[in-house]
Amino acid sequence: MPKLTFKPAHVTKRLVAVLPERSRDVISSRYGLIGKVKGETLDAIGKRYGITRERVRQIENSAVKLIQESPALEKEVASFAALEAAIRELGGILPEQMILSEFTKDDESKNHLYFLLVVGKPFIMSKESNDFKTRWHVDHELAKSVEDALKQVHSKVDPTDVLPEEKIVEHVMSCITRVNSKYRSKDTVRRWLELSNCIMRNPLGEWGKTDAPGIKVKNIRDHAYLALKRHGSPMHFREVAKSIEKLFGKGAHEATTHNELIKDSRFVLVGRGIYALKEWGYRTGPVVEIIKHILKESGPLSREEIMKRVSKERYVKPNTIIVNLQNPLFVKKDGKYSLKK
């Protein structure tokens, strides 16, 4: 990964030094350049000075323009060139948060780096949209090609698709034929994928539409869904809880996990404390309902055939199935059971 050859805080200190005192304070406060983790709001600064938020905005805009037109900016050309080169090395267009986190870890340094993006002439920001996150680029033609390619990928992914990362990367690679070959690497494409607001990656590294099952993970139920899907077969709720902790490093109390599984229609209770995914073809309901569905679909069946089929959907003892066959819903004739008419 590229590293910056300069300290952003040192550069911003030299740049804001050209401003009048009030403008310098407004810029430093707005962008968190004086030790603040977060910049102040227009309203907060306005109250401090007894002016409107719109007037604060005007002061901010004028101060940025003053810096951009000052000799001080020209003196920092090497630093801005280094930042531009680093962004190009990462793909030329990146989500805002990715740029900030790639080059520095502490929040104060991120504030300084963000300010350099704002005042630096090579850097162009695009606001968040339905398709993309807030992003910065250093090449308009490249940015358009990447965004067009991602839009094509958005249209290729079905609403229920959950794709391995290699597959989604292949989709993007097939759509960026007009992009300079130096950018056509899988690592760069992975970073470009983070631009999207339409598709996203789940904690297991799989990709899909943001509202596809198993993609956006919000709570224990979602983690349980992914744990079961990764396992590929029914699990006891205690196993599910342990799997959540192992796969995601997220503590999951057994009782809480059980309660969440009970409440979510994606899961089917198939045995004592054992759950499967409904999408695997398991039907909801007690054993008697499963027998009823089987006979309705297949017609009269022997006890052995019924037991075999029920066992594919429920983890229960043979005697449990036999007891349920005594229900008045079923009649036995010539060694076969059928639904009572």
Image (tube, rainbow, N blue to C red):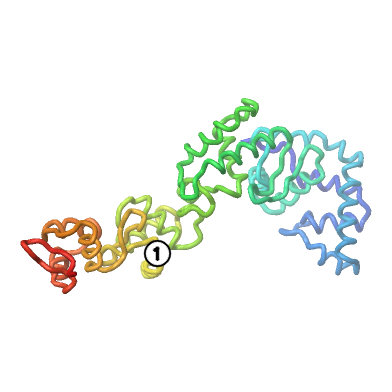
Q: Is residue 264 visible?
A: yes
View extreme (top): residue: 181
In the image: residue 37, left or right of residue 47: left
The amino acid type, in three-letter code, at marker 1 is: Ser
Q: Is residue 87 visible?
A: no
**Residue 56, image x, y percentages:** 87, 60
**Residue 245, image x, y percentages:** 41, 58
Total marks placed: 1
Q: Is residue 18 above or below residue 236?
A: above
Q: Residue at x 78, y 62 (%)?
A: 40
**Residue 199, image x, y percentages:** 55, 47
In the image: residue 66, left or right of residue 129: right
Seen from the viewer's position, the closer of residues 280 and 187 is: 280
Q: Residue at x 45, y 56 (%)?
A: 249
Seen from the viewer's position, the closer of residues 238 and 318 is: 318
Say which residue label 1 marks. Answer: 265
Q: Quadrant of the N terminus?
A: top right
In the image: residue 166, left or right of residue 329: right
**Residue 24, image x, y percentages:** 88, 54
View extreme (right): residue: 20
